[in-house]
Image (spheres, grey):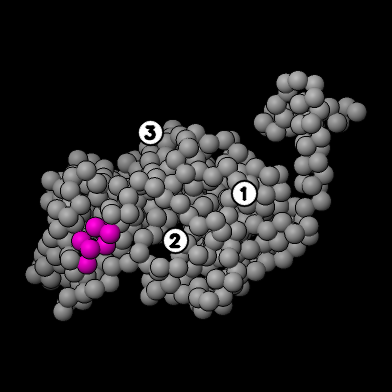
């Protein structure tokens, strides 16, 4: 009886039992005991991996774990490295699956401890590790019949502001291989027409690598800035505009370009230099401009983010739930950032499962800013999950359905598989 009382007290503290009238209390006690039995009997049994072809910039990789009692949890391991084959991704996923096979999906801490060193080995490893972790959270929520955000402490907001990343869906180029300003304008206009209040683009992507000739550098930078000016003119000043430089500059050029872009009143200026190699340079750029800076999309773990947080190299940090170590690690990173007075805006140019996992996490993060959404890559994105993603007036509503609130449409995945 003592153990039962202690269990019920613990479940009450966790928010699974709210004592009120005797009848309601009894019903909740029975539900909690049933949930406890379900937890005890839930063991991870199998894995399935689905890879779908999206475009030249990468595939979407979805993971599905199934328990002995038929509960299904999903995660996403997309963009683990452009040079990584489908076979390598699946091998990494299988390796991390072995750490949870025949184990309780509620033992996430154990999984994280056992897999952490391997996850640090490469971006592919980090991404596979993170996908399995996401799926475990989804199983937990679906087993208990509650949304993942409730497992993480409860939601702090009902809606999440999102921005449309039009970069991967913009591909028309000029004779020099640089994407056209008119193509960016068209996609930006389409996204705004569908209700988005914030747009991100990366017009520096075709810039020739440094070092380069002075003329080439000036030409490439001028083209990128003109693309941004054209989009600002198209969307007006009431829609937020974000730029990702994808580390194509150095410190001096990063400051120079930031100064040139200040009149455009950007929402943020992202990764002029690689923050994993050039922390001091990133900080120097941040200090030299009035623009808000952001970065950290490829960084793994708290140890990777620590230098960026301690130095305040960016104003906004961008951990990616697929690459940073999963949902739990994203929460840890956000907490570290909060103590330094920094905001968090997860990187997420991904498929719908990573989006759902990101929403579950940021619903509970007090220093959250805005969430990325890949826009315009494929017309069948919404058909891959059930129910489909819902976006309205630049926001997505946080679900109260169990787990991430979605399931994979395996039949549709088969139509687009690699």
Residue with the mark numbered 2: 350
Nearest to the eye among marks 1 and 3: give it: 1
Q: SS for tag 1?
A: loop
- SS majority, magenta: helix
In the image: residue 289, left or right of residue 344: left
Which one is in front, 234 or 216? 234
The residues colored magenta run: 183-190
Label 1 Cα crowd, 10 Å radius (few <14 / some 14-19 / many 20+):
many
Which one is in front, 96 or 385? 385
3D distance between C-alphas at marks 1 and 3: 30 Å
Q: Residue at x 79, y 47 (%)?
A: 38
Residue with the mark numbered 3: 341
Tell me where residue 392 appears, x and y as whole percent.
Answer: 39, 47
In the image: residue 153, left or right of residue 341: right
Asked if the magenta segment contains residue 135, the reply would be no
Q: Residue at x 68, y 66 (%)?
A: 47
Q: Which mark is residue 403?
A: 1
Asked if 167 appears above or below 268 in the picture, the reply is: below
Label 2 Cα crowd, 10 Å radius (few <14 / some 14-19 / many 20+):
many
Q: Residue furthest right?
A: 1
Q: SS for tag 3?
A: loop
Nearest to the eye among marks 3 and 2: give it: 2
């Amino acid at each position: 009886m003592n153990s039962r009382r202690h269990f019920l007290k613990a479940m009450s503290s966790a928010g699974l039992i709210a004592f009120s009238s005797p009848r309601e209390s009894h019903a909740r006690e029975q539900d909690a005991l049933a949930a406890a039995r379900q937890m005890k009997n839930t063991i991870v049994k199998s894995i399935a991996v689905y890879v779908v072809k999206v475009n030249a910039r990468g595939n979407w990789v979805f993971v599905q774990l199934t328990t002995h009692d038929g509960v299904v949890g999903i995660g996403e391991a997309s963009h683990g490295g452009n040079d990584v084959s489908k076979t390598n991704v699946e091998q990494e996923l299988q390796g991390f699956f072995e750490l949870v096979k025949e184990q309780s999906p509620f033992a996430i801490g154990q999984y994280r401890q056992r897999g952490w060193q391997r996850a640090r080995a490469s971006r592919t490893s980090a991404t596979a590790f993170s996908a399995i972790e996401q799926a475990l959270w989804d199983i937990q929520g679906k087993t208990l019949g509650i949304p993942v955000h409730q497992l993480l402490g409860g939601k702090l907001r009902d809606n999440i502001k999102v921005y449309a990343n039009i970069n991967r869906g913009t591909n028309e180029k000029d004779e020099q291989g640089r994407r056209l300003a008119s193509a960016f304008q068209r996609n930006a206009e389409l996204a705004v027409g569908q209700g988005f209040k914030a747009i991100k683009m990366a017009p520096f992507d075709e810039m020739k690598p440094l070092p380069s000739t002075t003329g080439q550098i000036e030409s490439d930078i001028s083209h990128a800035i003109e693309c941004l000016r054209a989009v600002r003119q198209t969307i007006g000043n009431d829609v937020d505009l974000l730029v990702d430089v994808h580390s194509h500059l150095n410190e001096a050029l990063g400051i120079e370009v930031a100064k040139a872009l200040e009149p455009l009143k950007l929402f943020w200026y992202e990764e002029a230099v690689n923050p994993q190699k050039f922390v001091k340079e990133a900080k120097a750029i941040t200090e030299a401009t009035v623009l808000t800076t952001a970065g950290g999309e490829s960084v793994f773990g708290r140890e990777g983010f620590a230098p960026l947080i301690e130095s305040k190299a960016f104003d906004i940090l961008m951990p990616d739930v697929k690459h940073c170590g999963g949902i739990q690690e994203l929460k840890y990173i956000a907490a570290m950032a909060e103590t330094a007075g920094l905001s968090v805006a997860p990187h997420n140019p991904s498929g719908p499962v990573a989006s759902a996992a990101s929403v579950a996490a940021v619903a509970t993060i007090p220093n959250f800013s805005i969430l990325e959404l890949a826009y315009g890559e494929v017309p069948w994105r919404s058909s891959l999950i059930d129910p489909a993603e819902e976006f309205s007036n630049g926001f997505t509503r946080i679900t109260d359905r169990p787990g991430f609130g979605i399931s994979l449409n395996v039949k549709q995945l088969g139509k687009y598989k690699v």
